[in-house]
Amino acid sequence: MKDGQPSAIYLKDYQVPAFLIDKTELTFDLDESVTIVTSRLHMRRNPESKFRTSPLILDGGEDVKLIALAMDDYQLPPEEYRIQNHQIIITATADQFILTCETLIEPQNNTRLEGLYRSSSMFCTQCEAEGFRHITYYLDRPDVMSVFTTTIMADADKYPVLLSNGNEISRELNEDGKTVAVWHDPFPKPAYLFALVAGNLEVLEDTFVTQSNRTVELKIFTESHNIDKVDYSMDALKRSMKWDEEKYGREYDLDIFMIVAVDDFNMGAMENKGLNVFNSSCLLASPKTTTDDGYQRVEAVVAHEYFHNWSGNRVTCRDWFQLSLKEGFTVFRDQQFSSDMNSPVVKRIEDVSFLKTAQFAEDAGPMSHPVRPASFIEISNFYTLTIYEKGAEIVRMIHTLLGEALFRKGSDLYFDRHDGHAVTCDDFVQAMQDASGIDLSQFKRWYSQAGTPRLTVTGDYDKSAKTYKLTVSQMTPTTSNQPTKLPLFMPIRVGLLDTKGQALTVELDGESKTNHVLTLSKSEQVFEFFNVDEAPIPSLLRGFSAPVKLSYDYTVEQLAVLMSSDEDGFNRWSAAQELAVRELNALITQAKRNEPLSIESQLLVGFKHLLSDESLDKSMVSLILNLPSQAYLSEISDEVDPQAIKQARTYLKQLIAKALEQEFADCYERNNIALDYLPNAEQISQRQLKNVALSYWNESGSIAAKKAVLSQYHSADNMTDQFSALSIAVNTDHDDSTSMLEQFYDQWSHEALVVNKWLMLRAAQETEHGLEQIKALMSHNAFDLKNPNKVRAVLGGLGNSVSTFHDESGSGYAFLADQIIVLNKRNPQLASRLCTPLTRWRKMKPALSVLMQQQLERILMEELSKDVFEVVSKSLA
Ligand code: B3K
Ligand code: ZN
């Protein structure tokens, strides 16, 4: 960092705003060269602020030019205000006044993709968290809630669609050929929920009748070539609206709900009031262009953004430290929704597997932070897995502790009590406590303490007394800035099995059943079960009832029993993972020592059984067959050797593939049935199993399998099957992989989202000249540095390629650092996200660690955005 270093802001310094804005009237005169924004802010001093004479300070950005400033129609001369650090400071103000502010912005030059910018031929906005200040000067903080009226003027031919939040209250054509549309949103909201869209767009329309019988208009807008791909999103939206009424009693409140798809977008989607803006990758779906995973993502994101209408918009965050108030709760809600729409156990396994791979890694790294952080330099860096996924786990634990009925009582109280207000995580927990009568004071530590707790469990059976004692101890390793950790309050769901896998009905605290919830609150606690007829196998942390790392010294035989018989589906998967991890770790150790790899795999018997038993859930079987990922094995390693992990995974997969070649072939053939594509749970699980089986079968080296890969690739009528076959071919150096890749590009070059999949697959390819390939991709016609999806496809793909990224010369790291340095100026949010793989440097084997560190140090020498500076400097600290 060359000049002065950006400084952190702290939760402990929070003050209520000195001024409020009751009404916000905005006028946008949109144009391709300059856009003029005029605001009329109806302001008054906040009676709750103790600072009765403090100056008015409005946030702005380096890209906003002030043209005129007036107070109650009196033009302020330059000596009556000053601009400092992009803020306007006005020392003398009345207690109540109207501030008029005219600013000039250039959306066409906005490459940061926050504020107002252009994507393709449209104008669109992204204001969360602090984008609004790049549009005009404002009190850009979530606890300033205002009623917005927005006037949009734009060329009628080029921009027939003009949208903002709320309802359209008028629309007319000016004599200069511009349309003037006025939108009014009756619900007070913070500026981060403001949105504007202008473009030449097509629309899919539908309606939804709410539980109180109001008809809501639903509109999804896209560019014309994509309008055939939003039927599924519309369906998901209607299902979400219904589900939120039934599950949470939440009804939609405006007369219209709109979604717009844009191509250039920094994240997945944004919940602006009444006008959600989506990355097209999270909205568009069609069988031929979208995989099953893509469909499920669309369903989840549509639901997530819709659910924010209550958990985020009607009740919002007091300050950005409370981000998880809306994100953790809304992720929990979208997880529940997807679980209800599909298979609960499969959904849980997928979510936990993601949490344990990515959030646990974040929690153990230099950016580790509590779910309610105590400080930050750049809030955009805190849209993290900890805020979202761990935040959702915290809400899930409350749900487990309270049970369904009391949890609903708590959420009703929360929404009623805080409707229209900006509140804190404590307010959420308090509502849950008040509604249930359950003391959650110790539980609140989950919000302030970072790091993943470790649980160690031992069991002690007393044959004569028929009792079984479980001793559970917890400890959370220190994380940056938090040397001491206190014990946490958490639910641990457990059951006991006999040696054949039958559930034992046992007594705890006077209750006899097969499934108990223990509440752990101390560093060490003993739980005693009665009427235990034989020495049991404990099934611990069922459903992953708390986000912890658990260790219990199971024998291989016990794991095999859990894997085949536990009544808890999640723990069946978990036991299989544990077995696979043990074998992979043994192989990784051999690889690290340069020994020949060899193992007697205990997985074969279980896998053989899974492949032959047609009564089992196909998704579950697929999930169990998938070996722990490269990323997960890295997360659980003390010292990461990427090449050794890759070698171990390949070895074990081939060993299983060869031993069970016939079983995989049969399983593939049985499930390779032509179907009219539907993205439902039944079909998805069938395709999932078929493609996992094909992947193993191909790994066995069988010629028939190679033919099957090629034949599936060419005959597939849906993207799931086509892309699975292509990925299998590319990742195993199939003789036809080059021609398949070429054919794929030719077939899909007109579909941006499919091309992105192709970019990612090629970028992640394990080849000798990987870096040349990456460079060629970045100069390919299909690449565009302005489009975050494409950048993530190529540079994310690079991060996944062991041979290219972790090349021992350090060339992969240096290349990524080069790109971060370029993007740091164009799009700081994107640049900062791309740093993640380098931030893991301390855990890498020494030869690689030092090379990563050097690149971080090189980045730090540059003139950096706050975003990149924060991540890189914290990583090196
Ligand atoms: N709330 C937005 C995320 C905004 C990210 C800003 N850098 C999407 C979501 O979580 O629903
Ligand atoms: Zn969200």
Image (spheres, helix red, strand yellow):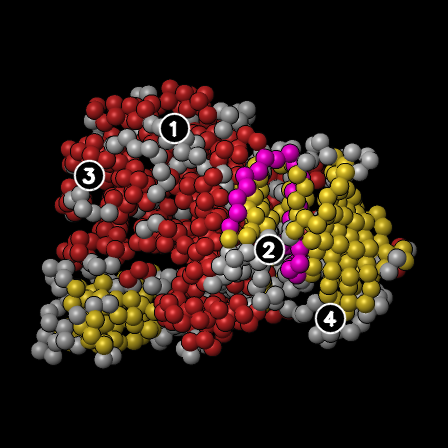
CA separation, marks 1 and 4?
62 Å
Which residue is depicted at the point 31% across and 75% down?
524
Pointer 1 residue Cβ closer than 8 Å to ligand 1: no
Image quadrant in which you'd find residue 800: top left
Whether the residues at callouts 1 and 3 have beta carbons within 8 Å, the answer is no
Label 4 vs label 2, nearer the camera: 2
As helix, strand or loop, the secondary structure at mark 3 comes to helix
Q: Which of 506 and 731 is in front in this view?
A: 506
* Marks 1 and 3, the one that precedes in the sequence: 3
The residue carrying pointer 4 sits among few (fewer than 14), some (14 to 19) or many (20 or more) residues within 10 Å by Cα, namely some
Residue annotated with mark 1: 767
Q: Where is residue 344 in the image (x, y as percent from the top left)?
A: 32, 54
Whether the residues at callouts 1 and 4 have beta carbons within 8 Å, the answer is no
* Marks 1 and 4, the one that precedes in the sequence: 4
Q: Nearer the viewer, residue 618 or 223?
A: 223
Residue 656 tag number: 3
Whether the residues at callouts 4 and 2 have beta carbons within 8 Å, the answer is no
The residue carrying pointer 1 sits among few (fewer than 14), some (14 to 19) or many (20 or more) residues within 10 Å by Cα, namely some
Magenta: main secondary structure: strand
Residue 46 tag number: 4
The answer to if 668 sits in the magenta stretch is no
Q: Where is residue 239 in the image (x, y as percent from the top left)?
A: 44, 50
511 is higher (above) or lower (below) than 335: below
Amino acid type, residue under disc 2 in the picture:
Leu
Residue annotated with mark 2: 254
In the image, which residues are magenta? 185-208
Amino acid type, residue under disc 1 in the picture:
Thr
Label 1 vs label 4, nearer the camera: 4
CA separation, marks 2 and 1?
54 Å
